[in-house]
């Protein structure tokens, strides 16, 4: 299987290292807009036979089965569309896009070209994510009517391309918010969001006391939203790169028969957000009228999620099956982020307009 990598920065190395471990898979080319960077990338990773380009369109002219897109958020749209149109299957890093309109177009291009567009949400490969989804989908909670998710770092703001609006498009929402939305929305079966009322701010990122690149900080470091879905479920979502607080609380699913509390696995100052695995899961229910709390036994976290996401992409190509984490689903995640940004700017609730087939 012949693979190309577009964008050769930090996360591209995780992709390349995963491909290198897979049998019958070869990274045959890489592209980066910074002249010489792709060449340095293939050399430093020992990909002697791989070709290097400064323009992704030249890479896409090669005979390739799939490409990993590892560029900053705002370029996911253009590079994904170009790759799909060139007949390649695509694993695009998160978030899917910056705007909802882009996500819709990317999803439609994938459907039209018959090439898969899958999104790099590696937390999905924590085995406990399947347990969480099974419990929520099993009906054990009764009718789920309210979900709370998100996460907060007390201080954990990235810099560089992540804080410049023209490259990242958004801040904490796009960087880590998309993971918590995926955790909750995936467990619920990705219901269609219909309205959002949100607030976003950047009091920490723009303050030199807290961020060394404060003068360049152009995105949100905090966001909170109430999201309504078409099946009546309400989601209370909050995300924070920085705050004067230890935690924004656990993820909770409230149902008419039981409730489920879920906490993240990570430890340390950058944890407390859903970019890792599940640390604990507890079922709150009544047994013969007694309030009962049942810890759910968890599986060990001994999977390399970054490797699994690349392997699943390769297996999906090989087996001719659909995208493991399809853009046609994640477009609804992007719709929430898009709605939050619009609502926060307008300071009022906004409708989410998705095409009928999405
Ligand atoms: N899944 C994860 O855990 C994870 C972790 C980090 C980053 N990411 C995502 O990966 C993406 C890249 O992040 P990063 O940390 O590697 O950033 P980075 O800035 O280290 O690397 C991005 C690279 O893309 C190149 N680039 C920009 N535009 C390009 C274009 N049009 N064609 C080719 N190359 C282009 C840049 O020159 C740079 O070398 C982001 O979308 C980010 O959200 C995901």
Image (tube, rainbow, N blue to C red):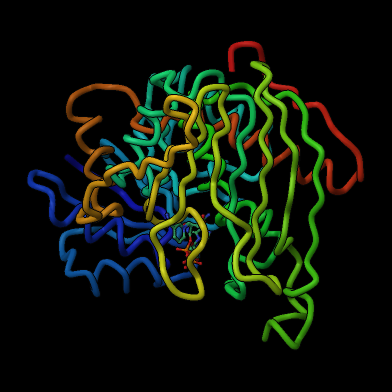
Residue 105, image x, y percentages:
60, 28
Screen quadrant of the C terminus? top right
Screen quadrant of the N terminus? top left
Which residue sits at x=77%, y=28%? Answer: 195
Q: In this view, does 95 lie above or below 203?
A: above
Which residue sits at x=74%, y=80%? Answer: 214
Residue 196, image x, y percentages:
77, 34
Residue 261, image x, y percentages:
49, 44
Residue 77, image x, y percentages:
57, 41
Q: Is residue 207 above or below residue 7?
A: below
Q: How many labels does the image show?
A: 0
Foreground residue, 348 or 280? 280
Q: Looking at the image, can residue 328 be seen?
A: no
Which residue sits at x=70%, y=59%? Answer: 166
Q: Looking at the image, can residue 151 be seen?
A: yes
Foreground residue, 289 or 180? 289
Outermost residue, top direction?
A: 356
| Lateral position of residue 15 relative to residue 57, left or right | left
Residue 44, by quadrant, is bottom left
Foreground residue, 73 or 251? 251
Outermost residue, right direction?
A: 347
Q: Is residue 15 above or below residue 292?
A: below
């Amino acid at each position: 299987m012949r693979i190309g990598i577009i964008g050769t920065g930090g996360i591209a190395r995780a992709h390349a290292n995963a491909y290198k471990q897979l049998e019958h898979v070869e990274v045959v080319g890489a592209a980066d807009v910074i002249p010489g960077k792709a060449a340095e990338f293939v050399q430093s990773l020992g990909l002697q036979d791989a070709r290097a380009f400064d323009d992704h369109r030249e890479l896409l002219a090669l005979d390739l089965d799939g490409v990993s897109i590892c560029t900053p958020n705002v370029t996911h749209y253009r590079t994904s569309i170009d790759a799909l149109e060139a007949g390649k299957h695509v694993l695009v890093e998160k978030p899917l896009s910056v705007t909802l309109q882009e996500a819709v177009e990317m999803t439609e291009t994938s459907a039209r070209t018959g090439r898969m567009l899958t999104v790099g949400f590696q937390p999905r490969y924590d085995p406990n994510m399947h347990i969480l989804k099974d419990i929520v989908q099993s009906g054990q909670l009764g009718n789920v009517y309210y979900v709370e998710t998100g996460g907060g770092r007390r201080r954990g703001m990235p810099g560089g391309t992540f804080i410049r609006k023209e490259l990242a498009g958004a801040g904490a929402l796009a960087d880590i918010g998309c993971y918590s939305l995926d955790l909750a929305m995936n467990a619920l079966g990705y219901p269609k969001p219909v309205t959002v009322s949100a607030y976003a701010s950047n009091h920490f990122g723009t303050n030199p006391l807290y961020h060394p690149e404060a003068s360049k900080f152009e995105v949100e470091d905090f966001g909170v939203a109430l999201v309504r879905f078409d099946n009546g479920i309400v989601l209370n979502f909050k995300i924070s790169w920085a705050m004067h607080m230890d935690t924004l609380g656990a993820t909770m699913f409230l149902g008419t028969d039981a409730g489920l509390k879920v906490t993240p696995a990570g430890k340390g100052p950058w944890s407390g957000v859903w970019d890792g695995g599940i640390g604990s899961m507890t079922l709150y229910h009544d047994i013969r009228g007694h309030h009962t709390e049942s810890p759910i036994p968890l599986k060990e976290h001994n999977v390399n999620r970054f490797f699994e996401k690349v392997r699943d992409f390769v297996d999906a190509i090989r087996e001719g099956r659909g995208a493991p984490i399809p853009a046609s689903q994640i477009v609804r995640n992007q719709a929430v982020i898009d709605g939050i940004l619009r609502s926060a700017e307008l300071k009022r609730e906004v409708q989410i307009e998705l095409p009928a087939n999405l």
